[in-house]
Amino acid sequence: MAAAFFGYLASSVLADRIGRRRNIMFFAVMCFVSVVVYLFVSISDTQMFFLGAPLGFFSAGIPAGLGALFAELHPTTIRGTGQGFCYNFGRNVAAAFPALVGFLSDRLGMGTSIGLFAGSAYGLAVLAVALLPETAHRGLAPLASSADESLPQTVRNA
């Protein structure tokens, strides 16, 4: 839990320093490496316990960086809708993974099944951010002037 907290913090700093895309790519690649070691390297229970910290650190860094990226990808008028769609589409796809891991584990083994789906998810994350534009240090588009008129005076002057 502490490792995940520090992963969130580190991701927020890195997203501003190295860019949104490279930040998410870094955390996704490191998650993949952590999962591979966790699942396929012969390690003791104690080593596995301590390896959970980097896995938690890196896995928390991905969603921590998505908020800024998603906000900067969508125009102001649909920003909340765009972010909500992106987050929840991903959650809906991921909801099938536990059942699919269970189904495949009977044939491939639990570690291989988890590794297959984790590797696919992290690979898809890297591919997706590689295809998106970099949004770091770009200002958010202001509301259109016609939309400004419908806002209360205190919001327009902020």
Image: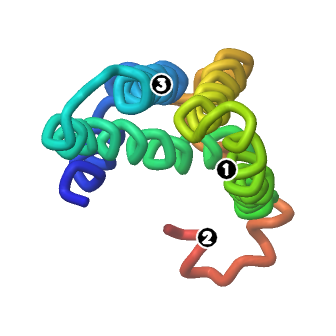
Residue labelled with disc 1: 142
As drawn, 119 above or below 56: above
Q: Earlier in the sequence, mark 1 or mark 2?
A: 1
Amino acid under label 1? Pro
Label 2, residues with CA under 10 Å away: few <14, some 14-19, many ≥20: few
Contact check, label 1 and label 2, Cβ < 8 Å: no
Q: Earlier in the sequence, mark 3 or mark 1?
A: 3
Residue labelled with disc 2: 156
Q: Nearer the viewer, residue 153 or 38?
A: 38
**Residue 120 x, y percent position in the rendering:** 68, 27
Q: Nearer the viewer, residue 49 or 20?
A: 49
Name the quarter where the N terminus is drawn. Answer: bottom left
The answer to whether 64 appears left or right of 41 in the picture is right
The answer to whether 22 appears left or right of 75 in the picture is left
Residue labelled with disc 3: 32
| Helix, strand or loop for disc 3 | helix
What residue is rendered at 79% in x and 51% in y? 93
Callout in the foreground (2, 3): 3
Can residue 92 be seen here? The reply is yes
